[in-house]
Amino acid sequence: MEDTFINILSQTGFPIAVAAFLLIRIERRLDELNQTLVHMIEIFSKNS
């Protein structure tokens, strides 16, 4: 039973870690993009 669990964990652990890492990076980029868009909207609304 332990061997099966370790085998499953070793096969799926790395892809899960990579997916989590990429999601965290994408989330940070999306937050930066959102802040930029909000700033641009504020600038355009002041100039209109």
Image (cartoon, helix red, strand yellow):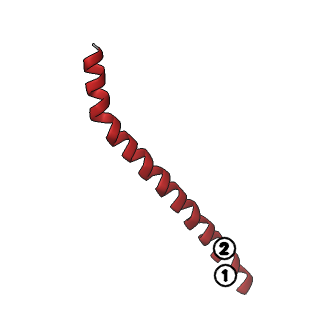
Quarter of the C terminus within the rendering: bottom right
| Separation (CA) of disc 2 from disc 1 | 9 Å
Which x, y percent locates residue 12?
30, 35
Q: Nearer the viewer, residue 42 or 48?
A: 42
Horizontal arrangement in the rendering, residue 24 relative to residue 36 (left or right): left
Circle 2: residue type: His
Q: Residue at x 30, y 15 (%)?
A: 2
Q: Residue at x 71, y 86 (%)?
A: 47
Which residue is the site of mark 2?
A: 39
- Secondary structure beneath dot 1 equals helix
Report the residue that reaches farthest toward the bottom. Answer: 47
Horizontal arrangement in the rendering, residue 29 relative to residue 7 (left or right): right
Q: Residue at x 60, y 71 (%)?
A: 36
Horizontal arrangement in the rendering, residue 10 relative to residue 22 (left or right): left
Circle 1: residue type: Phe
Which x, y percent locates residue 38?
64, 69
**Relative to 48, residue 30 above or below:** above
**Relative to 21, residue 16 above or below:** above
Q: Choose mark 2 or mark 1, whichever is in front.
A: 2
Which residue is the site of mark 1?
A: 44
- Secondary structure beneath dot 2 equals helix
Label 2 Cα crowd, 10 Å radius (few <14 / some 14-19 / many 20+): few
Mark carried by residue 19? none
First-in-chain label (2 vs 1): 2
**Relative to 19, residue 33 above or below:** below
Which x, y percent locates residue 24?
49, 51
Label 1 Cα crowd, 10 Å radius (few <14 / some 14-19 / many 20+): few
Q: Residue at x 45, y 50 (%)?
A: 23
